[in-house]
Image (spheres, helix red, strand yellow):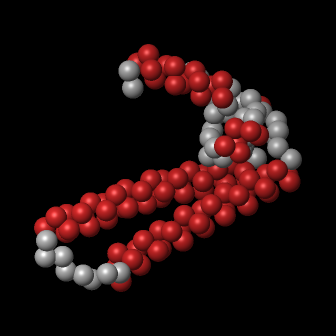
Amino acid sequence: MAAVSKTTAKPSMTPEKAAFFRHMLSQKINELLDEAGKTVSEMTYGTKENYPDPNDRASLESDRNFELRIRDRERKLILKMQEAIKRIDDGEFGICDVCAGPISEKRLMARPVTTLCIDCKMKQEKMEKLKGE
């Protein structure tokens, strides 16, 4: 699929809605950063217990690895949210990267980091399925 130039797309979002999405994204970023800070604090200054049982130590390591994987996924989500805020600033938020049509507000509420309208996303997923990705 060839991407359509976004310069031809007209903004479909009112300044009030853009401000709403900006606030929502900023708030979520702050929540995720707070959680990451708690995790770092707990892992750094948390329990310094020595587990003599190898099973207990393995369980603790497994829990920590799981927590770190979650935080890494959240870090990637924060980057996507920051990109969405930049799209708001640039007047490109809510405009599909592929067809330059509007992304529905309902879709943006469910997934504010999206860059594709539902039709283009469904086409993309269908192509990925056909390619076996």
At x 26% / y 67%, what residue is drawn?
Answer: 60
The image quarter in which residue 98 lies = top right
Image position of 86 (left or right of 80): right
Image position of 90 (left or right of 122): right
Q: Quadrant of the C terminus?
A: top left
Q: Position of residue 129 (x, y in %)?
A: 45, 20
Vertically, is 18 above or below 4?
below
Q: Position of residue 64 (x, y in %)?
A: 31, 65
Q: Quadrant of the N terminus?
A: top right
At x 36% / y 83%, what residue is drawn?
Answer: 45
Q: Can I make out residue 52 in this image?
A: yes
Vertically, is 89 above or below 26?
above
Counting labels gives 0
Front-lying residue, 121 or 110: 110
Q: Position of residue 41 (x, y in %)?
A: 41, 78
Q: Can I make out residue 95 in this image?
A: no
At x 35% / y 81%, what residue is drawn?
Answer: 46
At x 74% / y 29%, what residue is drawn?
Answer: 101
Image position of 118 (left or right of 77): right
The image quarter in which residue 89 lies = bottom right
Image position of 44 (left or right of 59): right
